[in-house]
Each structure stands twice: as C-alpha cells, then as structure tokens.
Image (tube, rainbow, N blue to C red):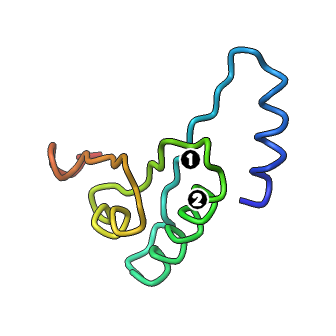
Amino acid sequence: LSEINDIMQRSSEFENVNIIGLMGMASFTDTISQIEKEFCSLQQIYKNHTSFTTLSMGMSGDYKSAIQYGSNMIRLGSVIFGNRNY
C-alpha cells in the first residue's frame, strides 16, 4: 500500500495507462475485524486520490463489510454460482 504514490507517478509515463481506482482482497480469514481493518486502509487510500472513481473490494464472503467501507464494485461468484468443486 505504501507504493501507491510511486505507482501513480510512474503510470503517467505511459500514454495509454489510466488508473481509475483500486482493487483489493481481504486476507483469507474469518476474522471480521481483520477484514474490516484492511478494507478501511483501502478506503483511506481511495479517499486520498480524488481522481479515483472505482473502489473494488469484497467477494461473496465479505461483500457486506466491503460495501460498508465504500466499495462500489464487488465480485460475487460463489453466491451466484455456488462453491467451486476442485
């Protein structure tokens, strides 16, 4: 997360690259407080970059917390299609 400013600056060197937001996944844990801490960190970065329009975080197991922390794009797979069979 600390590299975001460097990445933003370096991306301006590429004419066809336009970073419009962040995408993040919470750690693989059932600990809600850890998930929310990570979503909160992403939310702060998103708020500090006013050019961002997309905050994509949250999947089937944690999308409610993600929405609570400002996600405007969620990824729902197993909620729609069921669990994967490996």
Q: Is residue 60 left or right of residue 5?
A: left
Q: Amino acid at mark 2?
A: Lys
Q: Amino acid at mark 1?
A: Leu
Instruction: Identify the secondary structure beneath mark 2.
Output: helix
- The answer to which of 77 and 1 lies nearer the viewer is 1
Q: Is residue 6 left or right of residue 65?
A: right
Coordinates of residue 23 in the picture (x, y in percent): 52, 47
Coordinates of residue 84 in the picture (x, y in percent): 25, 47
Q: Which class describes the residues within 10 Å of circle 2: few (<14), some (14-19), or many (20+)?
A: few
Dividing the picture into quadrants, the one containing residue 21 is: top right
Report the residue that reaches farthest toward the front.
50
Instruction: Please state which of the two labelled residues, at mark 2 or mark 1, is closer to the viewer.
Output: 2
**For mark 1, what is the residue?**
22
Q: Which class describes the residues within 10 Å of circle 1: few (<14), some (14-19), or many (20+)?
A: some
**Residue drawn 52% across the image and 71% down it:** 40
**Residue drawn 28% across the image and 66% down it:** 64
Q: Which mark is residue 47?
A: 2
Report the residue that reaches farthest toward the top.
16
